[in-house]
Image: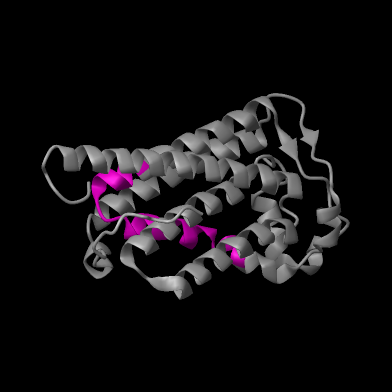
Amino acid sequence: MPTNSHAQPAVDWRKKFLNDFWFKFIGTSAFMSLFFWAYFFLLKNPAFPVTIMPLTVVDHWIGFAPLALIPYLSLWIYCSLPVTLMPTRTRLLNFGFWIGAMCLLALSFFYWFPTAVPPADIDWAQYPQVAFLKGVDAAGNACPSLHVAAAAYASFWLYWLACEARLGWRTQSIQILWGIAILYSTMATKQHVSLDVLAGAVLGMVFALASRWFDRKLQSVRQTRGMGGQV
């Protein structure tokens, strides 16, 4: 991941944590509600024939692990961290715009090219927690994995924000390992196959880098106008 080469004062995240709290809370809730409505509508009403994703050798290496459900569900906490830590509303809106565009692109793939993972030879009745997940989030909308894309997008932003706050390598290591655990969990719960994960990781990385480029442009414009500080 790219490093922040510009020497900047550390951000006091204790003050920023509650900054625009209700704006962040209401905005995130509205975004997720709209997204899930569209996601589950496409999941239950595919417009075209569904293609079953092929397995690779990686899928045979990674077996089913019921405990992987924990990092899988932790995505919603993980993706909320950059929102919570975002220091200003302008940067938050930039973050939200690009992740919204990423989700919209993925949803368009789900509409035009619906995919699903092949059924796993597992008796889900023996794993009621995972069976509940299977009942809510069926095997469709597989490629690209939006679960992975969102984790990758959040991981890049957590890296950049942690650099600004000078939180050190321990914090970076924890968040990166957390992100990797989420990626692993998508295959270990048999919600996705390796090709879904690869496509999702690329999607998340591309949109994260685009959002970071635009974020720096916004800050540069603000500084050029003589208003000082970051946007």
Left or right of 97? Residue 170 is right
Position of residue 185 relative to residue 99, above or below, is below
Where does the image place residue 63, in percent across and percent down from the top left? Answer: 81, 63
**Residue 28 visible in image:** yes
Position of residue 178 relative to residue 30, above or below, is below
Where does the image place residue 67, in percent across and percent down from the top left? Answer: 69, 71
Left or right of 141? Residue 13 is left
Where does the image place residue 4, in percent across and percent down from the top left? Answer: 38, 55
Label total for image: 0
Where does the image place residue 122, in percent across and percent down from the top left? Answer: 85, 60
Could you say which is closer to the camera, residue 229 or residue 16?
229
Q: Tell me the magenta residue range.
A: 71-94
Tell which residue pokes out farthest to the right in this image: 121
Left or right of 151? Residue 186 is right
Could you say which is closer to the camera, residue 204 or residue 212?
212
The residue under the point 54% across, 59% down is 75
Position of residue 120 relative to residue 170, above or below, is above
Q: Quadrant of residue 97?
A: top left
**What is the magenta segment's predominant secondary structure?**
helix
Left or right of 34? Residue 107 is right
**Residue 193 visible in image:** no
Could you say which is closer to the camera, residue 176 or residue 1?
1
Q: Quadrant of residue 9?
A: bottom left
The residue under the point 84% across, 47% down is 55
